[in-house]
Amino acid sequence: MRIDYLKHGFGYKHKNLILKLVVTIFFFGLVLKVVFFHSLPLNFLPVPEHPFPEKTNTVPEHQNTLVSEHVPENEDQLSHTNTEKCDYLSGDWVPNPKGPLYSENCNHIEPYQNCLKNGRPDREFLYWKWVPRKCDLRSFDAYKFLNAMRNKAWALIGDSITRNHVKSFICMLSTVGQPVVIYEEEGFKSKRWHFPSYNFTLSVIWSPFLVEADIIEDINGIPNSEIELHLDKLSSKWKDQFMNFDYIIISCGKWFLRSAIYYENDTILGCHSCPKRNLTELEFTFAYRKAIKFVLNYIVSSNHKGMILYRTFTPDHFENGEWSNGGTCKRTKPVKEGEMEIKYLNKMLRDIELKEVGNAVNEASRNGVNLKVVDFVPLSLLRPDGHPGPYREFHPFDKNKDKNVKVQNDCLHWCLPGPIDSWNDILMEMVLNG
């Protein structure tokens, strides 16, 4: 019996001791854990998971990559992803391996603008892009543009450079979908396209003086007598439709250098370059300033609710002559800023435009009219390589052609595709990003 007692007594005390030891170790570990974690820096402390995390304003990573490509849900919503006051016109032409957005196979290109199909042998002029020095300029995005311009109407008003520009514009937009021609004037003086999927219309209106002009032309479109120019009457071709457009790009220029009789109040004021007429000789700058002022006065008081862009004229690059006396443009690369000066007559035209439009912009702002000036001269001046030259004609040096026929060089208009496409990159930023 003694033996059983000792065995059972020893077992009970042994178990009690083990239990006390386990409890002591547990509490010691708990104290150690509390002391250890309180001694750690805050950024080492674990963050407890919670089934209902608090909402934050953090944008998910995948959304951040798409912010700059956001397409407004409402066509009137503007994006401000770029620098608010970016000088898109101060920059450089840099190599662009991607090349143009469209090819010479765009069926909207006029034959005299299609340099590649006309046999121009070099292609390097296609692989340059205009890059502003202090901000980003994204390439034209036809899908984004058309989405933002749903139910809108655009018009480009001016001379043959305007027609040149509209063909660049329509070729870029056609990479998304082909438009339908809904109006065409005989001889393609004016034309209108419609993009049904976006209910977007684009018009080009031929009005080289913007004011009323009586022009008698020969079969090649060259006036065969003095132009009769009414400096106090707007051309009805654009005036009658002006309020129907949401966005307007308007311009004029080179035509004012031609021989013309100037009228005001239906009375002859004088004439420019009319040696055979007994009329007061007036400088073209006189008519140019008067016409632009008259056009701008109408615009600033028009109560137009869209956007109006006055585009300055584009410089030519004739060297060793002009259009009519053998001038050529044989360069195949862009030039650097300062390597080529703007011609004296071109500078006179541009100075008048910048002064008069600058004054009008301020007055328009006070009247609630959104008028802006877009001066493409700085970037266009650096591209003497971008013109058709002799390739305004189909294979001008073909051995089967008459060697005695003079080859006309065109150093005024632009090859398509070509440098003029960069105008649309800038216009898209101005319109969509303010």
Image (tube, helix red, strand yellow):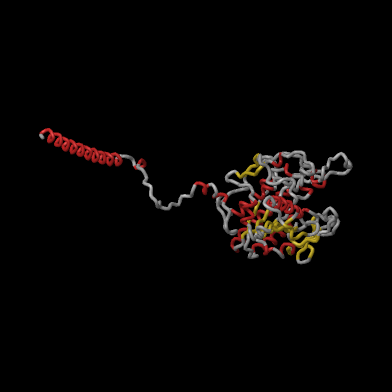
Q: Residue furthest front?
A: 1
Q: Quadrant of the N terminus?
A: top left
Identified at 22% across, 40% down, the residue is 23
In the image, is residue 243 above or below residue 66? below
| For residue 149, side relative to residue 398 (left or right) | left
Residue 22: x %, y % from top left: 23, 38
Q: Residue furthest top?
A: 3
Total numbered circles:
0
Q: Nearer the viewer, residue 265 or 91?
A: 91
Query: In the picture, residue 124 is in which quadrant?
Result: top right
Q: Quadrant of the C terminus?
A: bottom right
On the question of residue 102 being in view, the answer is yes
On the question of residue 289 being in view, the answer is no
Query: In the picture, residue 193 is in which quadrant?
Result: bottom right
Q: Residue furthest bottom?
A: 265
Residue 395: x %, y % from top left: 82, 42
Identified at 79% across, 63% down, the residue is 268
| For residue 112, side relative to residue 77 (left or right) | right
| For residue 167, side relative to residue 12 (left or right) | right
In the image, is residue 30 above or below residue 70? above
Residue 344: x %, y % from top left: 72, 47
Residue 341: x %, y % from top left: 70, 43
Q: Nearer the viewer, residue 183 or 299?
A: 183
Query: In the picture, residue 382 is in which quadrant?
Result: top right
